[in-house]
Amino acid sequence: MVDTDVFILWQHHHQVARKFFRQPPGRIYYSKQTRKELLHPFLSSRERRRIVRLLKRFRHVNPDQRIVAAFSDLLARYSYLRDHLGDALIAATASVKDLTLVTGNVRHFAPIKEIKVVRFPGDFGH
C-alpha cells in the first residue's frame, strides 16, 4: 500500500517516485483516504486529470467493516493517531489487507505494530 506522500512526490517530479510508479516492485494499492487527500478541491483541472490517470493504474481499496473496526482499534491502542485520522485509516487498511505500507512519513506509522512499514525513498534508492 502506498501512502499519499509518495504520490505527492510523483506529482512534484521526484525521480525515484517517477521510477517507482513506472516500474513498481509489485502490485500497488492505495486507500480511499489517499485518493481523498490527492484530489483536494484546490487542484487545477489539468493536475486532477494527471492524478486520476495515475490512480487508475493501481488498486483502490475502499473501507469495509473490517477496516472500520481496525481503524477504531488503532485509535484506541495508539492515542496519537487521534490527531492523525487519515494516517489511522491508511494504517487500518494496510493492516486488514495485510499490505506493506510504503511511506516517507515513517514516524507516524513506525509505532504501529499491526503493519509493516517501508521507508520511501530510502529503501528504493536515490
Image: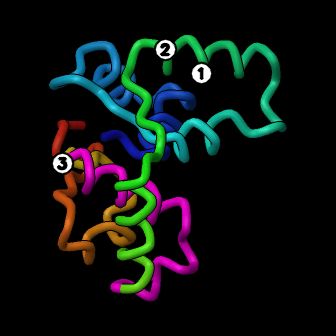
Q: Is residue 27 above or below residue 22?
A: below
Q: Local crowd at mark 1 within 10 Å, few (<14), some, or many (≥20)? A: some
Query: Secondary structure beneath disc 2?
Result: loop
Q: Which mark is residue 56?
A: 2
Quarter holding the C terminus is top left
Which range is magenta? 77-97
Residue displayed at 22% across by 23% down = 27
Please name the amino acid that badge 3 sits on. Answer: Asp
Label 3: how many Cα within 10 Å (few below 14, some 14–19, many 20+): few
Most common secondary structure along the magenta stretch: helix
Residue at label 1? Answer: 51
Pair 2/1: label in front: 2
Query: Do tag 2 and tag 1 residues touch (Cβ < 8 Å)?
Result: no
SS class, disc 1:
helix
Instruction: Establish if 104 lies above or below 13.
Output: below
Quadrant placement of the N terminus: top left
Residue 98: which disc?
3
Q: Is residue 69 left or right of residue 52?
A: left
Q: Nearer the viewer, residue 6 or 52?
A: 52
